[in-house]
Image (tube, grey):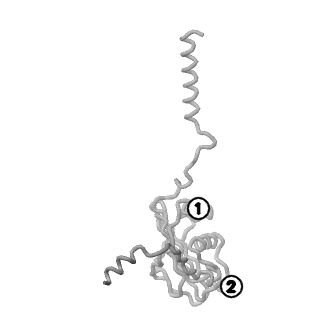
Amino acid sequence: MRPVSLICVVLLLLAGGCASSGGTSPSAKIDPYSGVPDDFSLDVTILAAEDEPQAHRRTARYVLFPDGTLLHDAEPGRGPNTLPGFTRRLSSGQMAKIWSDIRQLGLGTPDGADKINNFKRVRQPKTGHTYLVAVTADGDFWNYTRVVAPGEELDPALTTLLRELAALAWAEDDRRQEVRTAPVRYDFGPDPYATYRDNGDN
């Protein structure tokens, strides 16, 4: 084979390799978190005249910040004016799932949302439940206010969202399951600073 022909073959192989590397292979990874707005956050208040066993039917507060910080409390007297305590930090995947579920449930845009309300003016209901859900995303803000009479059920979309938040906050339907177990104390051997403490006492 002539040197010129050999050079042509090498160039063709290199060109083919470059062309194939520029395409999208089936195994190419797609970032599943890229669609979550940087300012995505949730503010949820459940006001119950009488707490019921199910997590989404008792007084509670859920606040989810854009960085994944989840605050939660489920104590009588909690309302939209209170900020619950820190519960956990959600992963990027968990944040992406919540945002994806919100969109699939039809809650991901202001379309169909209620008129913007001042949640701080909402009072504890004398009967039934009141649900306050506020969403922030893409520089916009919208909310949902639902009043559920005794014996009635919240609409499925909001129920699904609240159940998901309750699961992420470890809020069990059985309140007794929410009692935190005693921390496990591990024995790492003798105290390495005991000698110094003893010398300090002498």
Q: Relative to 18, does residue 54 appear above or below in the rendering?
A: below
Residue 146 spot, x, y in % from top left: 58, 77
Tell me: residue 88, above or below residue 14: below
Q: Residue at x 49, y 74 (%)?
A: 189
- The residue furthest top is 2
Kindly indicate the quadrant of the structure image that contains residue 99.
bottom right
Given contact means CB atoms under 8 Å apart, are the residues at marks 1 and 2 in contact? no
Going from N to C along the chain, the mark reached first, 1 or 2, is 1
Q: Which circle marks residue 97 in the picture?
A: 1
Q: x%, y% of residue 170?
A: 58, 75
The amino acid sitting under disc 1 is Lys
Residue 72 rendering spot, x and y as whole percentages? 52, 76
Instruction: Answer yes or no: is residue 196 visible.
Output: yes
What residue is rendered at 66% in x and 71% in y? Answer: 156
Return the residue nearer the eye: 36 or 49.
36
Amino acid type at circle 2 is Gly
Q: Residue at x 32, y 84 (%)?
A: 201
Residue corresponding to mark 2: 151
Question: Could you say which is closer to the camera, residue 181 or residue 38?
Answer: 181
Mark 2, residues whose alpha carbon is within 10 Å: few (<14), some, or many (≥20)?
few
> What's the mark number on residue 43?
none
**Foreground label between 1 and 2:** 1
Occupied quadrant, residue 196: bottom left
- Name which residue lies at 67% across and 81% down: 152
Quadrant in which the C terminus appears: bottom left
**Label 1 vs label 2: CA separation?**
31 Å
Q: Which of these two is toward me, 82 or 153?
A: 82
